[in-house]
Image (cartoon, rainbow, N blue to C red):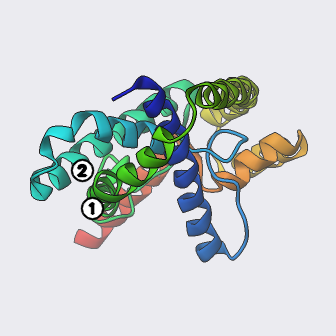
């Protein structure tokens, strides 16, 4: 497949992923929350995942069962690695599925894995043919201008958002020294007072936890189970 098409698909699915996240929070919280790490309306993990599915699963289009299983594996590995890398970079767990019955280290769970399989089938059997038909009809020069514009905006967004994330990481370092609820609340208040971009980050991930917080929760859970078994 033409590389230009893959770039466009990346941005399309990043935007659709953002819509999915926003709609999910709208249903849950009854208000708009700009989800994702970036300022713009994109969730790159969805774009990367769908592009990987497009590249890697083309040989399995004739077998929906294999495609479903492979989509689960590819997207689950991507989500797990993304969670691990983000935690190492910014010293915080951005999402945690530990409360779900079937999960792996709280980074992925059965519910999301099933969703990935369904999403993979929808993308490859329905969405890709639809979007590729539209993209192929666009004039080459116009398509190149669109791609260049999107890439410039994306790089600017990453640059600004990275600065925000670095500030956030520096604040989270305090939590590594003292993970009490009072300190956690204080840090979130400090971040909230620093500006719109940091406030947006807290709203997008209200349940974010430092590594120290997660360890404390795990210890409390173990203690509770031990007391219950006596």
- 160 with respect to 128 (left or right): right
- Residue 7: percent from the left, percent from the top? 49, 30
Res. 230 visible in picture: no
Q: Nearer the viewer, residue 181 or 83?
A: 83
C-beta proximity under 8 Å, tags 1 and 2:
yes
Whether residue 207 is situated above or below residue 146 in the rendered picture: below
Q: Nearer the viewer, residue 161 or 223?
A: 161
Q: Which mark is residue 9?
A: none
Quarter of the image where the N terminus is located: top left
Q: What is the x, y in percent for residue 199? A: 80, 48
Relative to 145, does residue 24 appear above or below in the rendering?
A: below
Residue indicated by mark 1: 114
Is label 1 in a helix, a strand or a loop? helix
Position of the C terminus, as image quadrant, is: bottom left
In the picture of the structure, the residue carrying the numbered disc 2 is 72
Residue visible at 72% across and 55% down? 203
Observer-nearest residue: 21 or 54?
54
How crowded is the residue under tag 2: few (<14 C-alpha within 10 Å), some, or many (20+)? many
Task: Depth check: give the residue in front, 89 or 145.
Answer: 145
């Amino acid at each position: 497949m033409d590389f230009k098409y893959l770039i466009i698909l990346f941005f399309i699915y990043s935007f659709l992923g953002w819509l999915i996240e926003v709609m999910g929070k709208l249903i849950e919280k009854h208000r708009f929350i700009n989800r994702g790490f970036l300022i713009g309306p994109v969730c790159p993990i969805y774009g990367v995942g769908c592009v990987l599915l497009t590249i890697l699963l083309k040989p399995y289009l004739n077998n929906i069962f294999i495609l479903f299983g492979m989509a689960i594996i590819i997207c689950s590995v991507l989500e797990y690695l993304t969670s691990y890398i983000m935690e190492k970079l910014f010293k915080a767990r951005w999402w945690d599925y530990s409360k779900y019955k079937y999960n792996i280290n709280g980074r992925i769970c059965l519910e999301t894995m099933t969703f990935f399989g369904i999403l993979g089938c929808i993308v490859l059997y329905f969405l890709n043919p639809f979007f590729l038909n539209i993209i192929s009809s666009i004039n080459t020069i116009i398509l190149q201008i669109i791609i260049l514009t999107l890439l410039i905006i994306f790089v600017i967004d990453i640059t600004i958002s990275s600065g925000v994330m670095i500030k956030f990481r520096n604040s989270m370092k305090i939590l590594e020294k003292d993970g009490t609820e009072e300190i956690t609340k204080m840090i979130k208040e400090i971040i909230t007072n620093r500006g719109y971009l940091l406030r947006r980050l807290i709203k997008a991930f209200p349940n974010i936890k430092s590594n120290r917080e997660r360890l404390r929760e795990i210890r409390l859970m173990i203690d509770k189970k031990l007391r219950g078994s006596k």
